Image: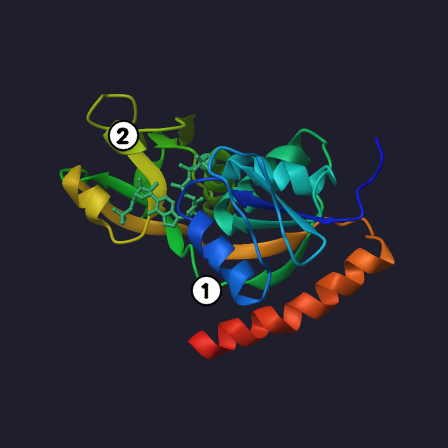
Amino acid sequence: MSQSNRLRIAIQKSGRLSSESIALLKAIGIKLQIRDRLLIAHSTNQPIDLLRVRDDDIPGLIMDGVVDLGFIGENELEEKMLERRASKKAHEFKTLRRLDFGGCRLSIAVPTEFKYDSVASLNGKKVATTYPYLLERFFAEKGISAKAVMLTGSVEVAPRAGVADAICDLVSTGATLEANGLREEDEVFVSKAVLIQKSEDLSPDKQALITRLLPRIDGVLQAKE
Ligand code: PRT
Ligand code: ZN
């Protein structure tokens, strides 16, 4: 397979990070034509292609060196890094910038009737989460022996469904927890969107393009402060 000399950037196809990732690229002068169904979008004024995928795939695409840059939430990035490190897969990347969107926290929440004094109240309990590696690292740091139960969706209904005693899920406003009779107790990880680069060296042309783009990103971030 011939290596394209166009810079490849992975972005979430549709979800909470998509529109702000695209808005940032446009704000730094990259013209993009995005057709909704297509996996690839080409820039019309820069040697840049966007690869539009599920956010879960972005850390692996970077760590396997398949794309050059990616926009991803730190929660997803750190979880996939821990998972890949545990299974001895490539897990290196470089963080270029921490961005001003996608902010959330990965928190432990319990049903309102659960008596929670500290994280030690979770000893011997089951905690449903989509982020078992982040949660188990937190338990290990705190010396807690609790079980992370993996659920890829509907984590907030796990206690009511009798699947777990508590949950560990992403929170932004807290409305979802409240609607499900859950109370936020402890923060496991605080996250924002980041721009990352694969760890292997890029061609001089690609690296020079990134070096030109980064000050423009800084300008956009500063203007919004
Ligand atoms: O389809 P794909 O796999 O690409 O998307 P996805 O459904 O996995 O992800 P998406 O678009 O929901 O989220 C992408 C990223 O946005 C996450 O990985 C986080 O980095 C970031 N983010 C920021 C959030 C939230 N805020 C957030 N509130 N991701 C999810 N939520 C969910 C949370 O899981 C819970 O269900 O929103 C609900 C809680 O919100 P509040 O406001 O009620 O507290
Ligand atoms: Zn996802």
Compare residues 180 and 200 and report the one nearer the observer. 200
Callout 2: helix, strand or loop? loop
> Amino acid under label 2?
Asp
Position of 138 relative to 194 (above/below): above
Q: Residue at x 54, y 34 (%)?
A: 38
Q: Position of residue 55 (x, y in %)?
A: 51, 39
Compare residues 140 and 46 and report the one nearer the observer. 46
Q: Residue at x 47, y 78 (%)?
A: 223
The quarter of the picture where residue 147 lies is top left
Callout 1: helix, strand or loop? loop
- Name the residue tied to disc 1: 100
- Name the residue tied to disc 2: 165
Q: Position of residue 128 (x, y in %)?
A: 35, 30
Position of 39 relative to 187 (above/below): above
The C terminus lies in quadrant: bottom left
Q: Position of residue 111 (x, y in %)?
A: 19, 37
Query: How far is mark 2 from mark 1, CA to CA?
Result: 34 Å
Q: Residue at x 64, y 53 (%)?
A: 44
**Crowding near the residue tagged with mark 2, few <14, some 14–19, many ≥20 C-alpha atoms within 10 Å:** some
Mark before the other along the chain sequence, 2 or 1: 1
**Crowding near the residue tagged with mark 1, few <14, some 14–19, many ≥20 C-alpha atoms within 10 Å:** some
The N terminus lies in quadrant: top right
Q: Residue at x 66, y 58 (%)?
A: 45
